[in-house]
Amino acid sequence: MGRTLQVILLVALGIVLLAGGFSGGFIAGHLLPPSNRDSAGLAPILPVATVPAAANTATPADLQDLFKPFWEAWQLIHTQYVEQPVDDTLLMQGAIRGMLEALGDPHSTYMDPQTFQDANSELEGSYEGIGAIVDTTGAYLTVISTFPSSPAEKADIRSGDQVIALDNDDMTGIDPEVVRQKVKGPAGTVVHLTIARAGEGAPLEFDITRAKITIDSASGKMLDGGIGYVQVTTFGENTTRELTSALRTVMAQNPRGLILDLRDNGGGYLETSVEVVSQFLGSGVVLYEEYGDGTKKPYNATSGGLATKIPMVVLINEGTASASEITAGALQDHGRAKIVGVVSYGKGSVQNWVSISNDQGAVRITIARWLTPKDRQIDGSGLAPDVYVERTAQDRQAGRDPQLDAAVEVLMSIISGKPIPTSVPTARPAATP
């Protein structure tokens, strides 16, 4: 499936901490064919034509005066800096990084070669780490969500947790991207995290053993009462195939209704979200990409979905972000499904990842924002559920899932043609950014 790599990195997004830690970012995009990938098959490579020709030449004549201070600084470093020789590659990477930082956009960044490769590994289906999605744009590395059955989930790491110390070293003032790199490590090794958590009077301490995380991005089963249940945990390369298989198994059992669980789904490839929506929506706009000049590009559902008529409810929570918000928003706007849970994360800006010359990583640039079919902006506000139901830490510890219980109750009401029960809390407005 041909895809260029566009990214929906969340409002507080990080890079995918793959080779040994968190997964950090809400990636939604298009992949290129395998022939355009690197030898490891991990990093999607955009066509050279996407990079301006001037990028591969000396300083253009009309920019020589503008860049004169840069080359003066370059020369001073090489002639006067006390530690010689300097690493020209690191200087070049630092210059690109600083240029992107000057935009003032936390989602427009430079990715060095290793980070670029790491940032794509999760969507391949497995990686080594603790199994969480993180945000690297704030003062501290912040957890967005955890993968099911991951070391992070088993340790009770939660959305909103901030890593304030790592292996007992204070992380105050340390770039969260550097912290992300420090969390990385091989399976079987232990990382000690000191966590600041809202509502806790003192920091929390966690010893987490890193593991190889194998991500089953879609699965399904039957619940009591003839209710089908499908969970999508990420929007990766295998998701459409896995979802199709799960739906075939579930739909063959003639369910009365269907629950789609998108809780703690941090996102994934754009095309995958369109393909997922198309399994439940026979036609219509899935989302709009809105550019700086006000123009909008629609993405439409394709025909042939396996579950386009069955009554449906979608579960979301605070860890539902980017591509999963696109999916939930499309189904909600088209009246295809009721949404149950809490306000979603709120990430709806679009980044292009463009690989640069000589295998020196990639530049990630915000190019647009994403809107739901009814022109609702997700970024900064998230999606408000139709039925607001929380799942507390006490619920999790006790093995209770009031959100799933409410989804079943709402779905049974839809099936029977009755109003949503008054015993289920009504929706609250989306939180302000």
Image (tube, rainbow, N blue to C red):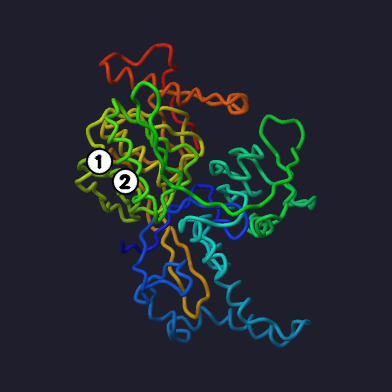
Mark 1 to mark 2: distance in Å?
Answer: 8 Å
Pick the front one: 251 or 280: 251
Residue 81 coordinates in the image, percent (x, y): 75, 82
Q: Position of residue 283 (x, y in %)?
A: 20, 42
Q: Of the residues under marks 1 and 2, which one precedes in the sequence? A: 2
Above or below for 113 versus 19: below
Q: Which mark is residue 191?
A: none
Neighbours of disc 2 within 10 Å: few (<14), some (14-19), many (20+): many
Mark 2: amino acid: Thr
Q: Residue at x 50, y 60 (%)?
A: 121
Tell which of 95 and 163 is nearer to you.
163
- Residue ID at (59%, 56%): 128
Relative to 256, 127 lies left or right: right
Q: Quadrant of residue 174?
A: bottom right
- 392 or 429, which lies in front? 392
Q: Is residue 404 visible?
A: yes
Q: x%, y% of residue 247?
A: 32, 40
Whether residue 172 can be seen here: no
**For the N terminus, which image quadrant?**
bottom left
Report whether 67 appears left or right of 226.
Answer: right
**Pointers 1 and 2 in contact (CB under 8 A)?**
yes
Residue position for label 2: 244
* Mark 1 residue type: Leu
Residue bearing the label numbered 1: 306
Spot the residue most to the top. Answer: 422
Q: Is residue 205 above or below residue 98?
A: above
Q: Is residue 138 above or below residue 1?
A: above
Give coordinates of residue 281: x percent, y percent.
Answer: 24, 39
Q: Secondary structure at mark 1?
A: loop
Q: Residues within 10 Å of mark 1 (few under 14, many from 20)?
A: some
Q: Judging from the image, what secondary structure is the residue with disc 2 in?
A: helix
